[in-house]
Image (tube, helix red, strand yellow):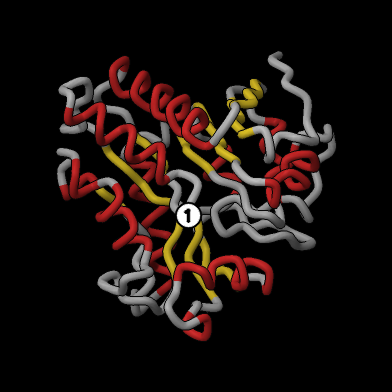
Amino acid sequence: MKIYIEDNYEAVSKKAALIVASQIILKPKSVLGLATGSTPVGMYSELVRMFNRGELDFREVTTFNLDEYYGLPKQHSSSYYTYMMENFFRHINVPEDKIHIPNGMAENIVRECLEYEERIRIAGGIDLQVLGIGANGHIGFNEPGNKLNVTTHLVGLSAKTIADNSRFFDNPQEVPKEALSVGIATIMKAKKIVLLATGSNKAEAMREMTSGFVNTQVPASILQTHSDIILIADREAGALIEEIND
């Protein structure tokens, strides 16, 4: 595990973008696992700038998003489909047929989850998975609990996650109570993982996930067992952990 503590959000975003860019340059046909939320926005902006400068080409890249709200149309302003289009996909040249986001409006959710896993398998698995971390230690929408789902699944969101995500909705009552999320085992199969964390509200979760103990109440703690993971935090999020590179 490599841990980098950066001075601020901008520095976190730039370092993460450089890692993703290096992956694409070294392997143009990379399969990327992508995250949403407020933390990766700066990384996406930096990747768009690199594309506009002619430094990156996404034509052969395939992407799989971690999650999507259940029952929320993709055209909704707060869907993760809309988030990805506005913050990233509309500004680069990744082919539309290589973009994969779970369908939260699928009539058969079980089938949708199974087919999403199959699409990842057919693509050859995730080369580089980008993650954020919830204040409660979730990754994707894998929430704290007595057990964790291993593959893509429908999950009930915790009260904490619903409250945290209400800032993305005009009406807090509109926040979905469920979501589709890639599971823990699928995340762990990624060849490389980069996790971003910013803000003091993530400090406790970051300490718990790097404590040396795996705990289903802190789903991100399983990442300690991955063979190639990079954590990038600003000073607030990393305040309770040490900058150690093994």
Q: Position of residue 60 (x, y in %)?
A: 19, 31
User: Which quadrant holds residue 224?
Assistant: top right
Q: Which residue is mark 1?
A: 37
Residue at point 68%, 74% (across, down): 159
Q: Badge 1 local density, few (<14 within 10 Å), some, or many (20+)?
A: some
Q: Position of residue 95 (x, y in %)?
A: 15, 43
* Residue type, label 1: Gly
Q: Position of residue 135 (x, y in %)?
A: 68, 54
173 relative to 90, above or below:
below
Residue 143 left/right relative to 24: right
Q: Quadrant of the C terminus?
A: top right
Say which element carries label 1: loop
Residue at point 56%, 36% (across, down): 195
| Foreground residue among 153 and 134 | 134
44 relative to 160, above or below:
above
Residue at point 73%, 60% (across, down): 144
Residue at point 78%, 25% (across, down): 242
Q: Quadrant of the N terminus?
A: top right
151 relative to 47, above or below:
below
Q: Position of residue 17 (x, y in %)?
A: 40, 29
